[in-house]
Image (cartoon, helix red, strand yellow):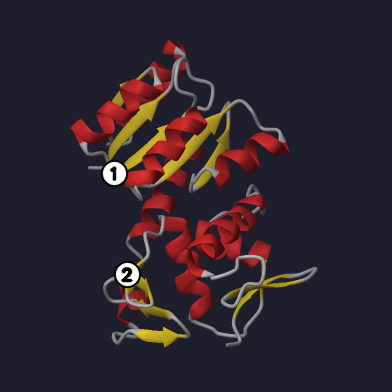
């Protein structure tokens, strides 16, 4: 059973989403403010956070940033604010996915499952290469799902880790944003390629000495991204 922390200030939306997810077998902790959400994160130990942006007190963006300071728990923003700026800012704050309200229970359920699969990739992917693989200053261990840089562990959110694992499995091969969206986020026609760009930006900030001149996740202008060459 997945433990979901829902942070949503609208009582009607909170009740409806709680009922919809409980029907699908999830355990729900639902709170109405960012402050309560941060407290519940520590007290209840959820598997995933569903977070509204427009909250009283601490905003959803600030709550997302504070969570990311201490935890790499999956975060999905669910907000009525679907403008480009709002989506990009939410993703840059550390969210793994972004859903624009109103959204059906089926859509929310699908996104939850997709994000959680990034935390635990399928067994063939994990066991394909047991030994750590070194790329420059990075050591990628697919068995333990860990990444170090010059021997120091990197704290990567689920989407960042899955993206790095996917790209580094095929060095120098270029993937379109749409392909990465399908493979990493498991989105298809309803997906948003801004998820990819924001995740690349966050990943570069953690893996590169100079994110403006990336050595690992490189841009192929007009098409997408590739890993290396080094």
Residue 129 sits in which quadrant? Answer: bottom left
Quarter the C terminus occupies: bottom right
Residue in view at x 64 percent, y 43 percent: 88
N-terminal of the pair, mark 1 or mark 2, is: 1
Q: Secondary structure at mark 1?
A: loop
In the rendered image, which residue does mark 2 sit on? Answer: 145
x then y, percent, for residue 91: 56, 45
Residue labelled with disc 1: 47
Q: Residues within 10 Å of mark 1 (few under 14, many from 20)?
A: some
> Residue 89 at what x, y percent from top left?
61, 40
Q: Nearer the viewer, residue 29 or 107?
A: 29
Relative to 13, is 219 above or below?
below
User: Is residue 19 visible in this depiction of the protein?
Assistant: no
Q: Residue at x 33, y 36 (%)?
A: 24
Query: Where in the figure is residue 195, as x and y percent of width and height?
Result: 60, 52
**Quarter occupied by residue 214:** bottom right
In which quadrant is the N terminus drawn?
Answer: top left
Image coords of residue 141 (percent x, y): 33, 78
Name the residue: 27% across, 34% down.
Answer: 41
Depicted 125 relative to depicted 179: above or below: below
């Amino acid at each position: 059973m997945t433990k979901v922390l829902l942070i949503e200030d609208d009582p009607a939306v909170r009740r409806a989403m709680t009922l919809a997810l409980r029907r699908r077998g999830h355990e729900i902790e639902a709170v109405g403010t960012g402050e309560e959400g941060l407290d519940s994160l520590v007290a209840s130990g959820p598997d995933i956070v569903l977070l509204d942006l427009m909250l009283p007190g601490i905003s959803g963006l600030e709550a997302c940033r504070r969570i990311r300071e201490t935890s790499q728990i999956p975060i999905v923003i669910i907000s009525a604010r679907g403008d480009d700026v709002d989506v990009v800012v939410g993703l840059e704050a550390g969210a793994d996915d972004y859903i624009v309200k109103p959204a059906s229970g089926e859509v929310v359920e699908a996104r939850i499952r997709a994000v959680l699969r990034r935390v635990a990739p399928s067994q063939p992917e994990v066991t394909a290469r047991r030994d750590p693989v070194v790329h420059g200053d990075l050591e990628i261990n697919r068995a333990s799902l860990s990444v170090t840089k010059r021997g120091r562990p990197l704290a990567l959110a689920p989407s960042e880790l899955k993206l790095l694992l996917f790209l580094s499995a095929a060095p120098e091969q270029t993937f379109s944003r749409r392909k990465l969206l399908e493979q990493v986020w498991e989105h298809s026609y309803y997906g948003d390629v801004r998820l990819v760009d924001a995740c690349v930006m966050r990943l570069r900030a953690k893996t590169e000495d100079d994110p403006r001149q990336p050595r690992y996740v490189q841009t192929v202008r007009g098409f997408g991204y590739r890993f290396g060459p080094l």
